[in-house]
Image (spheres, rainbow, N blue to C red):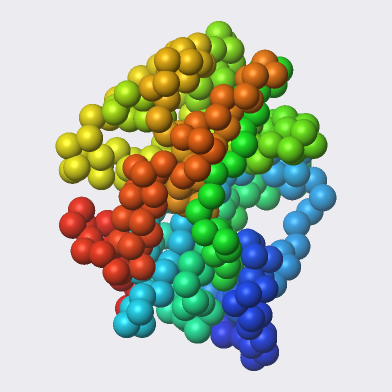
Amino acid sequence: MAYVIETELTSAKKQKPAADRLGFGNYFTDHMFMMDYEGKLGWHRPRIVPYQPISLDPAAKVFHYGQTVFEGLKAYRTADGRVLLFRPQKNFRRLNQSNGRLSIPAIDEEFALQALKQLISIDRDWIPSEEGTSLYIRPFVIATQPSLGASSSTHYQFIIILSPVGPYYAEGIHPVKIHVESEYVRAVKGGIGMAKTAGNYAAGLKAQDDAAQHGFAQVLWLDGVHRKYVEEVGSMNVFFKVDGKVLTPALNGSLLDGVVRDSILQLLRSWNIPAEERLISIDELYEAHRSGTLEEAFGTGTAAVISPIGELNWRGERLVINGGTTGELSAKLYETLTGIQRGELEDQLGWMVEVE
Ligand SMILES: *Cc1c(COP(=O)(O)O)cnc(C)c1O
């Protein structure tokens, strides 16, 4: 379908925050993208408008039944002033996979990417250039039909907002302590764990808050059926290096198909480092730690790229990994991925997409 994006530029540009005050997701650019859905019209009326509050009926279904999905990706400014997106097609592909699971109508992926590029071009001045900074992109869909009927909405909005963000690691990449969660579960196979949707985050907050109270950065989620196989760490995918081999949980329906996860598997293959996607039990990791072969562990996701795990706390026992320091492979993956994203290393796998 051929869409025309109406554009209304702001008459009051906001002041941009200093780079050292950015943090994550606190500031938003001057414009946003919106598009509506309703039965006969399908997805229609794409528009770029000044960033502003949206008005919804209190009965809008998203508030009551959580019919909503989101994405997260980043635009990077290179030293020579170009603007690059990291594998954005994967994000729009996944948005539609999430849409499918939440019974939300699919969006034209190619058009969504084109709309995003147009929005970024307009707010290009907002992309910070300081080391480690980027423009975080949050596409999302909400169910807007004003009705308390517990059925799929007839109306939706697809919105993209942009937020300049500071470096994830202000003091350099460093390992965190993780609590292995044995009481709560995040998702089960057949549920919504494979979708990027609010409900999975809501389900994780209590465990995350309890873990934080005990001094842990995040929880390591075990599967919901056997309470035995590792799935994700916080809202990141998780990897372990055991006896020279890299292991990550296989995509089984209850965990998210991360873009960084996939990119790491591709890099490892290109480096001839053995990598396996399979079931990994917490007992296997415990045994590996006991025998001295649990060499590294790290989480992966767009925000941090790589988050090294320095310690796992399981049933009150502390499993310190690599002396609580960042492993060699974790550091190399971090340097490689961020180097490609900033346009400093050659993009051999054809991942980067330029915004003109
Ligand atoms: C977004 C997300 C990830 C990481 O995905 P990336 O595409 O690598 O950023 C992992 N797990 C969950 C639950 C997520 O929501």
Q: Quadrant of the N terminus?
A: bottom left
Q: Residue furthest right?
A: 58
Q: Quadrant of residue 67?
A: top right
Rendered location of residue 349, percent (x, y) = 20, 53
Q: Nearer the viewer, residue 100 or 121?
A: 121
| Residue visible at 25% across and 40% down in the picture | 268
Placement of 113 over or under 196, stated as above or below = below
Q: Nearer the viewer, residue 186 or 242?
A: 242
Left or right: where 334 falls relative to 315: left
Q: Is residue 332 in sight in this rendering?
A: yes
Q: Is residue 149 in sight in this rendering?
A: no
Q: Quadrant of residue 344?
A: bottom left
Rendered location of residue 152, percent (x, y) = 62, 35
Q: How many marks?
A: 0
Q: Residue furthest top?
A: 226
Q: Nearer the viewer, residue 244 or 112?
A: 244
Rendered location of residue 19, percent (x, y) = 60, 77
Rendered location of residue 153, percent (x, y) = 63, 41
| Residue visible at 73% across and 33% down in the picture | 211
Placement of 345 over or under 329, stated as above or below = below
Q: Nearer the viewer, residue 28 or 170?
A: 170
